[in-house]
Image (cartoon, rainbow, N blue to C red):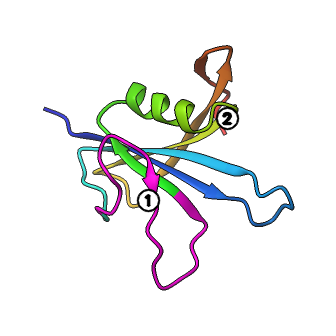
Amino acid sequence: MAYETYRVEITRDETSASGAASIEITVYLDRVPETDAPTRGRLTRASRGVWNSRLQFTGDFGTLSEALAAISAAYPDADRIRCYEYTVDDEYAREVAPLLRSGDKWRPAEKP
């Protein structure tokens, strides 16, 4: 049986005056995420550590549809999600095609 965790991370863009949010989903395939700080099944405000983090909200989900539902509820105007895949065979997460909103659905875009 394969093990999957979909980690959502929402960060604040400190390089622009608007401070727009950037949304990323990393799917961990057959590996456990290195940190266990995110809540399971919902997005919550990220805890502040020693550093002033750009990370605003985070959460781990069992399926992609649960992750997308949480993002849509928290950020209904979001139109792009950067996506990564992190398998047991990878040293680092690999970027894959982003998801773009098309109406009420999310669809993969061209590969990066």
Left or right of residue 18, residue 70 in this image:
left
Characterize the local packing of mark 1: few (<14), some (14-19) or many (20 or more) Cα atoms within 10 angstroms: few
Q: CA distance from mark 2 to mark 1?
A: 26 Å
Q: Position of residue 41 (x, y in %)?
A: 32, 40
Q: Which residues are magenta?
A: 36-56
Which amino acid lies under the numbered mark 2 shown in the image of this protein? Ala
The quadrant the C terminus occupies is top right
User: Which residue corresponds to mark 2?
Assistant: 78
The secondary structure that dominates the magenta segment is loop
**Residue at 75% across / 66% down in the picture?**
14
Q: Position of residue 52 (x, y in %)?
A: 58, 78
Whether 52 is among the magenta residues is yes
Compared with residue 20, is residue 109 higher up or lower down, i.e. above or below?
A: above
Q: Position of residue 106 (x, y in %)?
A: 58, 22
The quadrant the N terminus occupies is top left
Characterize the local packing of mark 2: few (<14), some (14-19) or many (20 or more) Cα atoms within 10 angstroms: some
Left or right of residue 6, residue 24 in this image:
right
User: Which residue corresponds to mark 1?
Assistant: 92
Compared with residue 3, is residue 57 higher up or lower down, i.e. above or below?
A: below
**Residue at 38% across / 61% down in the picture?**
91
Q: Secondary structure at mark 2?
A: loop
